């Protein structure tokens, strides 16, 4: 088997990237634990650290992190293999660490920071097959949504970048499914990158004539066949489909064959300290007529109940009223805020700058892993809304508008100016911008605007100054974070909301005009 795999690998050096990935993956699947290792002094030391300083869970988790960063292309094992050793060395070299292949504390900490953005993007969850049980890792990020599948479960990305099926075919043998699937692929002119069947399971990797990649792994399960089909198209957006395939393959192999695997790590990285308002009591019922934007009334208006997330401690009724900000993205009353702003809420209302009472809102969709939520405000059609622009530059001037500290600050809103100070968030999280624009509790969900009035981000978080000061003795200033407009655009498109592309043509707005435009599209969100 080893000789055969080596010949295949040699023949594949100049072939399709998917083929190179598959040969590496299947080599990892087929590798026998007794395969001889080349025990250099570095390897011997790395092996000692791997076995003596790491629990089995830690060993598996470290390999999952290497897979997430794209350095390891084989499934996790309980012992240190040459592939994991070499993958660790490559990661260390690329990240300025001593490349000795040992999973030291520093290496693991750096791995975690590097892997969290991708794990957060995928947001794996353990999900059971509806008829067979058998929970496996299935990505729930990327705004994947359930799709019809008579054989079990299916999840699809509205942008057609990645889709997953978890299938069970009753009353059929693994050999027949393998042969018929392989024949169908060849008949339809797919390039079969790799195929293998052994010990009651098979793997097929193929590329369609249009360039879409597929990975199939199926096992004999009682009198039927259980497995996953994964499809991805890098031409429509590279979301690491190859890495998802490795992790799902490892998860299914663990369930069916007892290979080492763990539950998905809690890696849907929550924003660093969310800039939301803790439960506050809305100011008293008095509403001075002369005020430009009256405070939210003490009694919430009638609103449509929104579905509660599966886990709701503390319950919404125990929270009192919590507040945040948000903005319109079309003229039909479609409104965006942060998912954490409306989490666990039964009633949602939005106060607009229209001299009317707060408008009832209903929850349409959420993306918890990227902290975005979509609301519908049916009686706010025709409202001013934002254009969405991608590609903000480092150092670019930006502005935020929102309703921070609604219990003590101006109810008419708060406008602040700053700059994009980094093109990624904490731990190089590529979903976020770091901004110097001052934001406070209650700014969450508000718009981040460029000088032309386009949305370039969604205000989401601020650094916990007290914790940093206690840890370092230094008080950081103006370190805040906003979700990038690319994440917002993906979320909107996945929910079939058309965006108006932003432009930088023409003259930049004066700050006063920018504030006026921001105020017109923004609302004060309150929920209970």
Image (cartoon, rainbow, N blue to C red):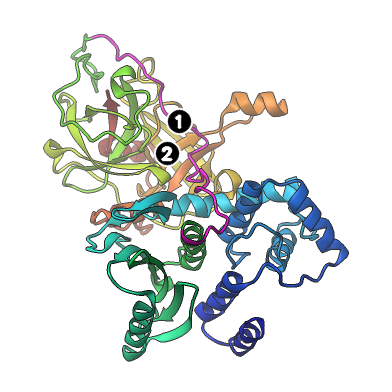
Tell which of 150 and 293 is nearer to you. 150
Residue 281 sits in which quadrant? top left
Q: Could you say where residue 131 lies in the image, as x and y percent from the top left?
A: 29, 55
Q: Is residue 176 visible?
A: yes
Q: Are marks 1 and 2 in contact (CB under 8 Å)?
A: yes
Question: What numbered label is drawn on residue 459?
Answer: 2
283 inside magenta stretch: yes
Q: Secondary structure at mark 1?
A: loop
Looking at the image, residue 279 sits to the left or right of residue 242; the answer is: left
- Which part of the image, by quadrant, shows the C terminus? top left
The answer to whether any part of residue 423 appears in the image is no
The part of the chain drawn in magenta is: 256-284
Local packing at callout 1 (Cα closer than 10 Å; few below 14, some 14-19, many 20+) is: many
Answer with left or right where residue 88 lies relative to residue 509: right
Residue furthest toward the front?
223
Observer-nearest of 353 and 303: 303
Residue shown at the point (72%, 25%) measured from the top left = 473
Q: Is residue 326 one of those drawn in magenta?
A: no
Label 1 to label 2: alpha-carbon separation: 8 Å
Who's the residue at 56% across and 72% down the image?
25
State the quadrant of the N terminus: bottom right
Q: Position of residue 458 (x, y in %)?
A: 40, 42
From this view, report whether residue 63 is shown above or below residue 318.
below
- The numbered dot on residue 275 is 1
Image coords of residue 186 (percent x, y): 36, 89
Q: How many marks?
A: 2
């Amino acid at each position: 088997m080893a000789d055969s795999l080596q010949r295949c690998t040699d023949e594949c050096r100049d072939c399709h990237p998917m083929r190179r990935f598959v040969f590496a993956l299947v080599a990892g699947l087929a590798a026998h634990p007794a395969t001889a290792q080349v025990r250099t002094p570095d390897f011997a030391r790395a092996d000692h650290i791997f076995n003596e300083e790491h629990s089995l869970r830690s060993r598996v988790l470290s390999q999952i992190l290497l897979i997430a960063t794209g350095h390891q292309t084989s499934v996790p094992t309980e012992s240190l293999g040459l592939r994991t050793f070499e993958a660790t060395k490559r990661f260390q070299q690329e990240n300025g660490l001593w490349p000795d292949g040992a999973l030291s504390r520093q290496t693991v900490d750096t791995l975690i920071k590097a892997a969290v953005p991708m794990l957060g993007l995928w947001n794996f969850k353990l999900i059971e097959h509806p008829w067979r049980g058998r929970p496996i890792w299935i990505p729930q990020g990327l705004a994947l949504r359930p799709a019809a599948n008579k054989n079990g479960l299916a999840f699809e990305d509205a942008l057609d970048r990645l889709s997953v099926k978890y299938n069970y075919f009753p009353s059929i043998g693994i050999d027949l499914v393998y042969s018929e699937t392989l024949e169908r692929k060849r008949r339809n002119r797919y390039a079969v990158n790799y195929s293998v069947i052994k010990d009651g399971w098979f793997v097929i990797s193929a590329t369609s004539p249009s360039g879409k990649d597929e990975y199939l792994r199926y096992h004999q399960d009682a009198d039927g066949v259980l497995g996953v089909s994964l499809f991805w198209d890098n031409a429509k957006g590279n979301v690491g489909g190859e890495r998802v395939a490795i992790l799902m393959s490892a998860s299914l192999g663990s369930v069916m064959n007892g290979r080492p695997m763990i539950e998905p790590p809690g890696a849907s990285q929550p924003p660093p300290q969310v800039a939301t308002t803790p439960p506050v009591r809305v100011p008293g019922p008095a509403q001075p007529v002369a005020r430009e934007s009256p405070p939210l009334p003490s009694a919430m208006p009638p609103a449509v109940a929104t579905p509660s997330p599966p886990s709701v401690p503390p319950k919404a009724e125990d929270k009192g009223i919590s507040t945040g900000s948000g903005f319109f993205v079309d003229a039909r009353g479609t409104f965006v805020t942060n998912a954490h702003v409306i989490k666990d809420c039964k009633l949602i209302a939005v106060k607009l700058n229209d001299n009317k009472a707060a408008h009832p809102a209903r929850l349409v969709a959420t993306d918890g892993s990227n902290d975005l939520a979509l609301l519908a405000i049916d009686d706010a059609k025709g409202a001013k809304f934002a254009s969405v622009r991608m590609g903000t530059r480092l150092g670019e001037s930006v502005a935020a508008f929102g309703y921070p500290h609604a219990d003590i600050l101006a109810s008419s809103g708060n406008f602040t100016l700053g700059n994009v100070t980094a093109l990624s968030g904490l731990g190089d999280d590529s979903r976020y911008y770091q901004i110097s624009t001052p934001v406070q509790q209650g700014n969450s969900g508000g718009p981040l605007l460029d000088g032309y009035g386009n949305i370039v981000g969604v205000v989401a978080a601020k650094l916990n100054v007290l914790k940093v000061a206690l840890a370092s003795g230094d008080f950081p200033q103006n370190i805040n974070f906003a979700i990038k407009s690319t994440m917002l655009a993906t979320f909107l498109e996945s929910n079939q909301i058309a965006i108006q592309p932003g432009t930088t043509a023409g003259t930049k707005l004066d700050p006063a005009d920018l504030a006026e435009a921001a105020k017109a599209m923004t609302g004060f969100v309150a929920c209970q």
